[in-house]
Image (tube, helix red, strand yellow):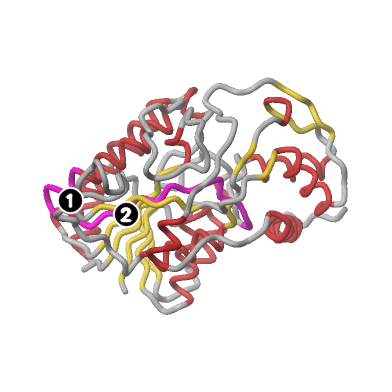
Amino acid sequence: MRILITGSSGFVGFSLSKKLLETGHEVIGIDNMNDYYETDLKENRLESLRKFNNYKFHNVSLSDMESLKKIFDTYSLDYVINLAAQAGVRYSIENPQAYMDSNLQGFLNILEACRKNPVKHLIYASSSSVYGGNKIAPFSTNHNVDHPVSLYAATKKSNELMAHTYSHLYRIPTTGLRFFTVYGPWGRPDMAYFSFTKDIIEGNPIKVFNHGKMERDFTYIDDIVEGIIKLIPNAPKANLDWNESVDSTSESFAPYKIYNIGNNEPVTLMQFIKTLEQKIGKEAVKVYMDMQPGDVHRTYADVSDLERDIGFKPRTSIEDGLGKFVDWYKEYYKVQI
């Protein structure tokens, strides 16, 4: 398969690209290498991918339609997986324009490129943040997601609506994946598990928001990658008899589908910190703080439709996943404790 992966130097994009390259597929990677977090990490991911002869990289922003058009015109693509986006709930409060440029204009450009250069399947990253202030758990793709609590979440919900429109008008098969707190080796330094590890090792205090009274459905990166790969050849089909009063709202009369990808087992923040302390072998200095704007109290994924459709659900425990991350962190940053 020839697959275009946007955000290929990002955490999920890199991990997916590497797995596909190892299994012999051709990957065309796009990334603008922005400095939202340390660029050295992105450069090292890219260096690792460039060792494969079946990888081609383009330093391009999704907001640059002309450059994107050239890439689509140059390669006869089978699939597109859009993982490029401006990430971060809290950063969306500080810098909203970045989310408009990347998450909305950038995604529109991807949709337009797929319209003019048809592909077998467009898969794109959504987020568990679309569930916003929802109280009913586990979160189901049948639940209403019209109450986001951050601009980041609003852009991800917008992506789902935009994808549905293009699926309906132009018959582009699209699948949106609502990721639940992805973690693991080569991860994002802005995520809590990464910054906590750094601070615990260095003896710095960690900020425990909402006084630790939060839960997250932590999902290990290998599970995310396996789920995406299983979905690539499983493009959604239109249900011409779809009825919103009885059928799932995660599908439609268009070739469109939404899935959750989460561990289906939320972990309390304090349990998460305790497990991380055990893996590092050092206790954290904790500073308890109030809830941050844009945060939610709990995430919990219902993955029953994912399990039904492709026979897959994430299965890595937080103990195993954090152990692998800490081992990687120590090796990558040459840390000795």
Residue under label 2, please give it: 175
Q: Residues within 10 Å of mark 1 (few under 14, many from 20)?
A: some
Residue that sits furthest to the front in the current view? 246
Circle number at residue 253: 1
* Rendered image quadrant of residue 232: bottom left
On screen, residue 180 versus residue 170, left or right, reads right
Residue 149 drawn at (x, y percent): 46, 25
| Camera-nearest residue between 92 and 236 | 236
Specify whether residue 243 is painted magenta: no
On screen, residue 247 versus residue 321, left or right, reads left
Q: How many marks?
A: 2
| Camera-nearest residue between 12 and 240 | 240
Residue at 12% across / 52% down in the picture?
170
**Amino acid tagged 2:** Thr
Residue at 27% across / 37% down in the picture?
105
Q: CA distance from mark 2 to mark 1?
A: 14 Å
Depicted 235 relative to depicted 291: above or below: below
| Camera-nearest residue between 306 and 130 | 306
Depicted 58 relative to depicted 132: above or below: below
Q: Which residues are magenta?
A: 165-185
Depicted 289 relative to depicted 56: above or below: above
**Of helix, strand and loop, which one carries label 1?**
loop
Callout 2 touching callout 1 (CB < 8 Å):
no
| Quarter occupied by the N terminus | bottom left
**Amino acid tagged 1:** Phe
Q: Residues within 10 Å of mark 2 (few under 14, many from 20)?
A: many
Residue 76 drawn at (x, y percent): 21, 68
Residue 138 drawn at (x, y percent): 52, 43
